[in-house]
Image: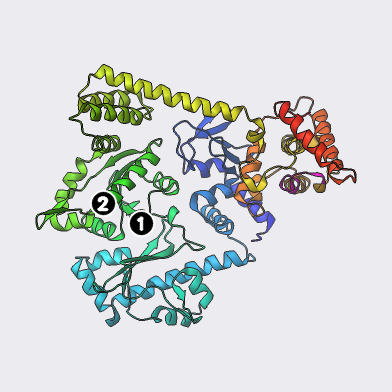
Amino acid sequence: MAFDRRFVEELIERSDIVDVVGSYVPLTSKGGSYWGCCPFHSEKTPSFHVIPDKQMCYCFGCKKGGGVINFVMEMENLSYPDAVRFLAKRVNMTVPEEEHDDGSRLRSRILQLNRDAARFYYEQLHSPKGTAVLEYMKGRKITQKNAMNFGLGAAADEWDGLITAMRQKGYGDGELLASGLAVRSKNGGIYDKFRNRLIFPVIDVRGDVLAFGGRIVDKNSDAAKYMNTQETAVYSKRRVLYGLNLAKKSKRENIILVEGNIDVVMLHQAGFDNACASMGTALTQEQIRLLSRYTKELVLCYDNDDAGKAATQKALSLLNDTDFHVRVLELPRRLVDGQYIKQDADDFIKFHGADAFEHLLSGSESGIDFRMAQIAGQFDLKTDRGRIEYASAAAKLLATLSNAVEREVYTMRAAEAAGITADAMKLEVSRAFKQKAYHEKKAQERKDLNPVTNLQPRERTIRYDDLRSALAEEGVLRLLALDDSLFGPEPPLQESEFSSPLLGRLFSVLWSQVKQTGKINVGALAGDFTQEEINHLSGILQKPESLKNAAQALQDYCRIIQESANKRTAEHYDPLAAAMEKYKYKANGGKLL
């Protein structure tokens, strides 16, 4: 995707990275730069660094970084062209005519196709072909107003209804297949993926239709009850929450997470317009990051069966080290013909009403209460062995709590549940806490004792073959970024002399930037390098580099690089000697010789 260089540079100048990042993450000013908790992974101690002078950001925890365009690409799950358009809209700039590449064109066409398909399904719902789906909705007590709110639609019981309508609008079979709306048959033709189903458009927080879910309406059908769009160029289920586009507008202070589309629809209809669902998958880090923009309190309301409890446990583990206040709403089982069966949110609303759900919601327990109750249920607390095993298991959980007061409160409760003294339980928790700290310390020591591994890029595809030369190459990049006056009118190195192809390419691009604009602009690299490559460059530029004796340092770096390049190209190059060089490097503690 090629945008005019001057347009991108002006866009970056208008899109101050502190303002953009600050609209997602609270930042604190420290010594001319800014710090905040990373929006890309869970943490309580800020490790996300925003540097106004360089117009870049970097997380020392998860190692993500880059300029303002890369930040928006990651936060909004956008391609490079879409991130540019997103920022342009933010600062009221008109995007010049750009030359679409195939990937960008396909993404744009799929989004248009999905929007047209959603309209088609909605119109089908209110036509004779949607009668069966309308009857199903009446049975589920979904109102017309709520159906309109969610844009619900109908896929008729036919093989090519959508395909025919979309072909008439100019969409090709390749686009229909790429969107997941059509499936290829064994004889080479294509047919509608969704047939005889209630359709749920999956709409993101920006209002784009990314995908669809379909619920079968024929009780006698052998087809799968639920069917969803597969991963596409515009849709990743890990990054989307069904109903969040509506839940984000709620005046309620929290967000309720449920399992299914119907649960979301019915909760909104009952007045709980803060509900959304994680698309039939366990909660992901990407979804947590998305939720953090709209609330600091989550209520987990998954189905009360083994799968639902497992999903709750996993979600609580992911949320353990975040700033979210988490509660768990366990729906009681319902007595039917002498047996207790599980209920989901839709069932509970239907049989007990909104007031009963509100009562449960107000009394929902904290995440740690739920996990403690789950542990207690695994042991027979009437026996000595059961109490001992419970105390040990509970202590391991309580040792993960960073808040000392919270740990103290739940330690007392665990002691009461186990029928042991508070002092004994405190001792068990203290032992588990020390054991956890010991294992973490040993793991860090093992990592610290392997400097070669630490100095290698995290991404395997860009690992260094010649570490000694690559570290010198990193030094050259840092010096170029810090003070380009150290360099003459011509580059001191050729790209081919770099042992790392990535570092060589970065040097060439950064050198060109300096000569054309007088400065390095990391933000302008987003269209030419992958996110992993930009992350790596950001990490390189974050490393300390002294400008004292910088001219000599540059000479030393260039000498090391050129020596390594000569060895690689010399006819008498000896692989055994190269291996010995690596051995000597390791023996010297990971320092340049």
Tell me if 117 is positioned left or right of 349 in this view.
right
Q: Position of residue 504 (x, y in %)?
A: 76, 46
Quadrant hosting residue 103: bottom right
Q: Which residue is mark 2?
A: 303
Q: Main secondary structure of the magenta part?
A: helix
Q: Which residues are magenta?
A: 497-505
Observer-nearest residue: 365 or 546? Answer: 365
Q: Amino acid at mark 2?
A: Asp
Observer-nearest residue: 311 or 26? Answer: 311
Residue at 76% from the left image edge and 29% from the top image edge: 584
Tell me if 141 is positioned left or right of 111 in this view.
left
Residue at 33% from the left image edge and 73% from the top image edge: 122
Where disc 1 sits, the SS reads loop
Marks 1 & 2, CB-CB < 8 Å contact: no
Residue at 35% from the left image edge and 81% from the top image edge: 158
Question: Distance from label 1 to label 2 (Cα)?
Answer: 12 Å
Look at the image and tell me whether residue 462 can be seen. yes
Quadrant hosting residue 479: top right
Q: Position of residue 405 (x, y in %)?
A: 31, 23
